[in-house]
Image (cartoon, rainbow, N blue to C red):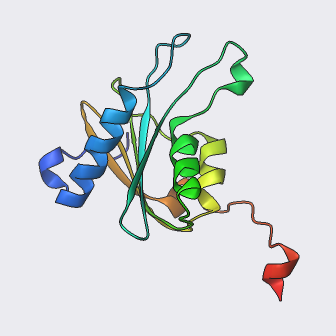
Amino acid sequence: MSQPLLSLAELTAEEQLLVESARLASERAYCRYSKYSVGAAIRGASGQVYTGCNVENASYGATMCAERSAVFAMVAAGERRIASVCVYAPGEPVAMPCGMCRQVISEFCRDAEVLVAGPGGVLRRSFAALLPEAFELVPEEDAR
């Protein structure tokens, strides 16, 4: 890591809640193949927190990452804007979102705060720093 990890005490109460929500979600992960549990928590623009965990499948392509699982829960609840994201994995190093998850998150935000956490601490980044030039397609009805 190019930057030292932050301790939980250095986070705001809102950030600590997001980390704890992601940590709890990681405990519910279905990861019988990799044994690598990941949890994610997303705070929508409304303030509501949505969680997800990784769900593996014997057909690895059918596996769902925690971040996308949380995004889909947010969308299913009717919300469309992400204010902040936290990804938690109980191992080291901290688990940065994969490229596919970054692209899915970009559909619902351009520059949310991202916390990447583990037992050793928390890394804080802007989403724009994680995916500076996201692919974007403007549907015809939105272009009018």
Q: Is residue 29 left or right of residue 98?
A: left
Up-down relation of residue 77 to residue 139 (above or below):
above
User: Residue 103's spot in the image, x, y percent?
Assistant: 66, 52
Q: Nearer the viewer, residue 89 or 96?
A: 89
Up-down relation of residue 70 to residue 118 (above or below):
below
Up-down relation of residue 100 to residue 55 (above or below):
below
Q: Nearer the viewer, residue 9 or 22?
A: 22
Quarter containing the N terminus = top left
Q: Note whether residue 4 is visible.
A: no
Q: Residue at x 35, y 25 (%)?
A: 27
Q: Is residue 55 left or right of residue 40?
A: right
Q: Residue at x 38, y 30 (%)?
A: 26
Outermost residue toward the bottom?
Answer: 144
Q: Note whether residue 127 is visible.
A: yes
User: Residue 5's spot in the image, x, y percent?
Assistant: 26, 43
Outermost residue toward the left?
Answer: 9
